[in-house]
């Protein structure tokens, strides 16, 4: 049986352990020295990592997938959620999504095949 | 060819036949429920074509009958079949369009209600709970569903509690809209992260 990838969740951010990061991924800029995985829509709170560039890097691909490369254990912090200690390794960063009216329109179009 | 290869080939043919039958049944179901307007139009078009053929045949028959060659009963049968085809084709197209219009009305009504009432209040007023379970912290989760007048899903949402409690120890509740077709709270939460229900088991969650 295939081993399940390790999942770590802090609120609406999920980190999935991966074996490799696409070679085309490029580093993203930090915000005031911190890596920000996601900002709160209303509160301005953020899922953030404070660590030197040698220990943590956030990367992105052309398909807008994001990956985290950790060379040492770091803390993932947020104003409302308990801090999570992340082990060194490679992670994909996944943000929580919701079904929208646009998704609904597309689904109905496919269903009715009217257009 | 070895016996196992033969068995594989036979299995593959059976699977292919089953697939064709399944697709045909799906096509018929979509026609019957009026979901597929293309299919409805095709059936209507075929009915019209058959009707024209029968009418032509009927005209020829009438001429022949004048000459005393064809039995008049055959012509009457032709007219009856052509009429039945036309009637069924027309009824089917009408039914399909009607169903589509009803569905559109229901969806617009839900969109309006969502915009004015909000998801939480809307599911509380019009929804029903179709699944419940506990999250990794032992907090209850509920899957809500709102149907249209024919019992088809219009909206599905999952009710979850925040993983980290507030200062007073309570956990904030929030609602997330998920795609129609989701049947369990676990699958709903997994979908929000783009993961299969079976693979969703966070090692740490705060």
Image: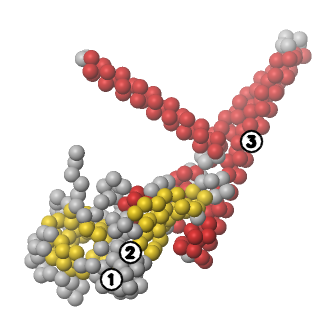
Q: Which residue is mark 1?
A: A80
Quadrant in which the C terminus of chain A is drawn? bottom right
Task: State the residue at coordinates (14%, 66%).
Answer: A89
Residue extending farthest to the bottom is A32
Left or right: A27 in relation to B97: left
Chain ID, mark 2: B
Residue A100 placement (x, y as % from top left): 49, 67
CA neighbours of label 1 inside 10 A, class few (<14), some (14 to 19), many (20+): some
Q: Is residue A53 above or below residue B129?
A: below
Q: Secondary structure at mark 2?
A: loop
Residue A77 in the image, given as x and y percentages of width and height: 24, 80
Q: Earlier in the sequence, mark 2 or mark 3?
A: 3
Looking at the image, residue B181 sits to the left or right of residue A95; the answer is right
Image height of B88 relative to A33, above or below: above
Query: Residue B159 or B8: which is nearer the viewer?
Result: B159
| Residue B117 x, y percent position in the rendering | 60, 76
To which residue does mark 3 refer? Answer: B90
Q: Quadrant of residue A51?
A: bottom left
Q: Secondary structure under badge 1?
A: loop
Q: Is residue B92 above or below residue B177?
A: above
**Residue B9 located left or right of residue B53:** left
Report, in whole angstroms, how far the alpha carbon at label 2 lies from the one at label 1.
Answer: 10 Å
**Residue A17, above or below B13:** below
Q: Does the residue at mark 3 contact the one at mark 1 (Cβ under 8 Å)?
A: no
Q: Which residue is mark 2?
A: B162
Query: The disc numbered 1 marks a residue on which chain?
Result: A
Q: With A104 as the anchor, is B196 left or right in this view?
A: left
- Residue at 30% across, 19% down: B6
The answer to whether any part of residue B139 appears in the image is yes
Asked if badges 2 and 3 are on one and the same chain, I answer: yes
């Amino acid at each position: 049986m295939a081993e399940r990838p390790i999942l770590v969740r802090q609120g609406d951010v999920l980190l999935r352990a991966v074996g490799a990061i696409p070679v085309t991924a490029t580093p993203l800029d930090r915000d005031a020295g911190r890596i920000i995985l996601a900002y709160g829509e209303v509160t301005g709170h953020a899922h953030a990592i404070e660590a030197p560039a040698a220990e943590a890097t956030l990367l992105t691909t052309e398909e807008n997938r994001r990956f985290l490369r950790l060379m040492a254990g770091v803390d993932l912090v947020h104003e409302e959620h308990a801090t999570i200690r992340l082990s060194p390794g490679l992670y994909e960063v996944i943000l929580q999504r919701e079904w929208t009216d646009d998704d609904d329109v597309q689904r109905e179009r496919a269903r009715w095949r009217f257009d | 060819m070895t016996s196992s290869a033969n068995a594989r080939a036979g299995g593959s043919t059976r699977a292919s036949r089953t697939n064709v039958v399944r697709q045909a049944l799906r096509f018929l179901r979509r026609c019957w429920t009026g979901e597929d307007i293309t299919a409805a139009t095709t059936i209507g078009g075929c009915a019209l074509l058959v009707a024209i053929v029968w009418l032509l045949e009927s005209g020829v028959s009438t001429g022949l009958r004048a000459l005393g060659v064809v039995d008049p009963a055959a012509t009457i049968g032709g007219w009856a079949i052509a009429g039945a085809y036309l009637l069924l084709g027309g009824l089917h197209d009408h039914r399909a369009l009607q169903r589509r219009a009803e569905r559109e009305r229901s969806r617009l009504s839900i969109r309006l209600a969502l915009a004015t009432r909000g998801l939480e209040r809307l599911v509380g007023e019009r929804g029903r709970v179709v699944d419940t379970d506990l999250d990794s912290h032992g907090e209850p989760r509920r899957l809500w569903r709102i149907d249209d007048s024919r019992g088809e899903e219009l909206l599905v949402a999952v009710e979850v509690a925040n993983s980290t409690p507030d200062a007073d120890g309570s956990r904030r509740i929030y609602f997330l809209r998920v795609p129609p077709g989701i049947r369990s709270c676990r699958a709903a939460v997994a979908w929000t992260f783009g993961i299969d229900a079976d693979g969703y088991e966070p090692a740490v969650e705060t």
